[in-house]
Amino acid sequence: MSVEQAADKVAEAERRQRETGQQLHSPGSRGPYGSAPRTLPSSGWPRRAEWRRVAALMDEEGWALYRPEQDVQGTTWAREREDRRTDALTRQAA
């Protein structure tokens, strides 16, 4: 992924976060999440933070391209997320 692509991902995550916040505070229908604000997905916030972290890392390290194998912290977090997901699916199937 290039620096420009990372910047686009940051902008997209910020747009989604903004739209989710607007949806949360708007009267009327909230789509598939009903009227309970706590049921709105919060994935926009972590996603935005992660893309901002990647963009900052690329800037700090002077990388023209992002390669996951260079990102020790990001790779560790991804592995931990996948382990938690696998565990949850295993528990759910049991």
Image: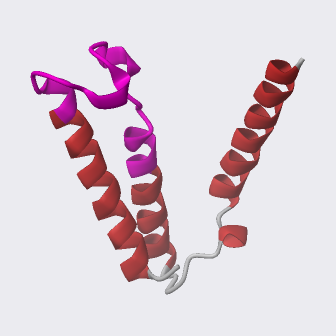
Coloring basis for residues: secondary structure
50 and 30: which one is in front? 30
**Left of 88 or right of it: where is 18?**
left
**Left of 30 or right of it: where is 87?**
right
**Left of 43 or right of it: where is 70?**
right
Image x and y of residue 44, in percent:
38, 42
Would residue 46 be counted in the magenta stretch? yes
In the picture, residue 51 is in which quadrant? bottom left
Does residue 28 lie above or below 18 as drawn?
above
In the picture, residue 83 is in which quadrant? top right
Image x and y of residue 70, in percent:
68, 71
Does residue 48 lie above or below 57 as drawn?
above
In the displayed orientation, state which residue is furthest to the right: 94
- Specify the segment rendered in magenta: 23-49
2 and 22: which one is in front? 22
In the displayed orientation, state which residue is furthest to the top: 36
Where is the C terminus found, in terms of image quarters? Answer: top right
At 85% from the left edge and 23% from the top edge, which residue is drawn? 93
Number of disc labels:
0
At 39% from the left edge and 19% from the top edge, which residue is drawn? 39
In the displayed orientation, state which residue is furthest to the left: 27
In the picture, residue 31 is in which quadrant? top left
Would residue 86 be counted in the magenta stretch? no
41 and 74: which one is in front? 41
**Left of 70 or right of it: where is 31?**
left
Image x and y of residue 73, in percent:
65, 53
At 11% from the left edge and 27% from the top edge, which residue is drawn? 26
Does residue 25 lie above or below 46 as drawn?
above
